Every structure is written in structure tokens, then in C-alpha cells.
Image (cartoon, rainbow, N blue to C red):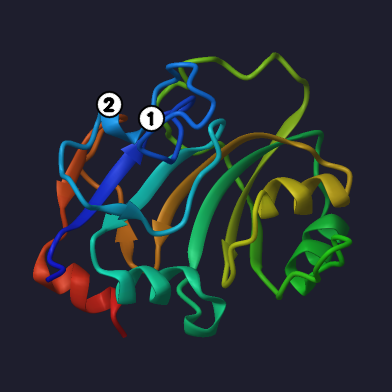
Amino acid sequence: MPGNYLVFYKPYGVLSSFTDPEGQGRPCLADYIPIPGVYAAGRLDKNSEGLMLLTDDGQLNHRITHPDFEHTKTYFTQVEGTIGEEAVETLSQGLALGDFHTLPADVSIIPEPDLPPKSVPVRDYHPTSWLKITLREGKKHQVRRMTAAVGYPTLRLFRIAIGELTLEGLKPGEWRYLDSKEVQLLTV
């Protein structure tokens, strides 16, 4: 019977699986999460940071990851270059990425957010811009592909929220159980 619901602050360089599929001993979830039987509800690539939800509830996992349920995922994204309103508008309206067309997204230019330093700093590109992007879907490498498609490659990607769920109170590598109110918010 399901009942474990965790939020994890994934550090840069950590795989979103419990083992390294290539057997190279790279850091993975098992190095941080001692709870058996939980699985990631969506993934972040090795080079991305931030919020991951883990659960043993298959129905909730499906609700979080399937676009029909429109659970938003919000990211802070550092991109190379000074991005303009035209590119932001294109990202907001949705764009063709070859194998799929993105849904409209909420995209805005923001000042540099107060994030912990990245363990491997972003190379010194000048200038850079920061975006806040909220998606209602989650395809593989979607944010990176979107920003590259409008000419602004992603340098740093940080998921700050899934719906109303945030990383409040956690530091990189830390996790906590969700309270019943947070679980309830994810099931609607």
C-alpha cells in the first residue's frame, strides 16, 4: 500500500535514478534517499538541480507526470546571452521542437535568483539572462531544447516547484516527507 511521499533537493551532477545505468559509480538517488520502494515522479537530468518528488504511489506518479493532469513545473533557467521579449514571447506561445510542439508556457525574464552556488560553476559567459519558466508538460530536456531553439542555450537549470510544492527549508542533498496537506494538493 502506498504511503511514502518525499521531496528531494537534487544537487547538480546527481542521476535521477537509484543506480548508475552505466555502472560508473556516479552519484545517484541511492546516495541520498534511504527509503526503499520509492520512485521519481519525473526526472531531472544529471546537469539540472532542484526539486524532485519521489513516491511509492503509482497513481500519484502518473498524475504528476502525465500532461492531462496539468501539474505545473516551474524552473529558473540561466541562458547564454541577453534574451529579448521576442524570444520570451515565442517560448510563451509554444514552439515546434521537431518531434513535438510545446504547449504554451508562462515565461518571464527575472533578476538573478538567490540560489546556492553550483558545485561546478557555470563558465564565465557574458552576458547571461535568467528566466522563470512554468510548463504544463514535461518532455525530455524540454527547457534546454526550448531555449536553444530560440537561440539562447541553457547554462543552468533549476526546478523550483511542482504545482504548489517547493524546496522550502531544504539544502542541496536533503529530503523530507510531504505532509498530508501537500499530498492532497498533488492529488487534485
Q: Residue at x 49, y 62 (%)?
A: 73
Residue at position x 87%, y 66% from top?
Answer: 96
Q: Residues within 10 Å of mark 2 (few under 14, many from 20)?
A: few
Alpha carbons under labels 1 and 2: distance apart: 6 Å
Residue 18 lies, in percent from the top left, at: 35, 37
Q: Picture coordinates of residue 10 (x, y %)? A: 38, 36
Q: Is residue 169 left or right of residue 105?
A: left
Q: Position of residue 151 (x, y in %)?
A: 89, 44
Tally the marks.
Answer: 2
Q: Is residue 2 above or below residue 11?
A: below
Q: Is residue 138 above or below residue 20?
A: below
* Mark 1 surroundings within 10 Å by alpha-carbon count, few (fewer than 14), some (14 through 19), many (20 or more): many
Residue at which label 1 appears: 28
- The residue lying at 45 percent from left, 74 percent from top is 71
Judging by the rendered image, the residue that carries numbered circle 2 is: 31
Disc 1 is placed on an element classified as loop
Relative to 30, is 94 on the left or the right? right
Quarter of image, res 115: top left
Is mark 1 in CB contact (under 8 Å) with mark 2?
Answer: yes
Q: Residue type at mark 1: give it.
A: Cys
Which corner quadrant holds the C terminus? bottom left
Residue 29 higher or lower than 51, as above or below = above
Indicate the secondary structure of the residue bearing disc 2. Answer: helix
Picture coordinates of residue 113, whole percent (x, y): 49, 39
Look at the image and tell me in which quarter the N terminus lies.
Answer: bottom left
Q: Is residue 143 above or below residue 123?
A: below
**Residue placed most toward the observer, 84 or 145:** 145
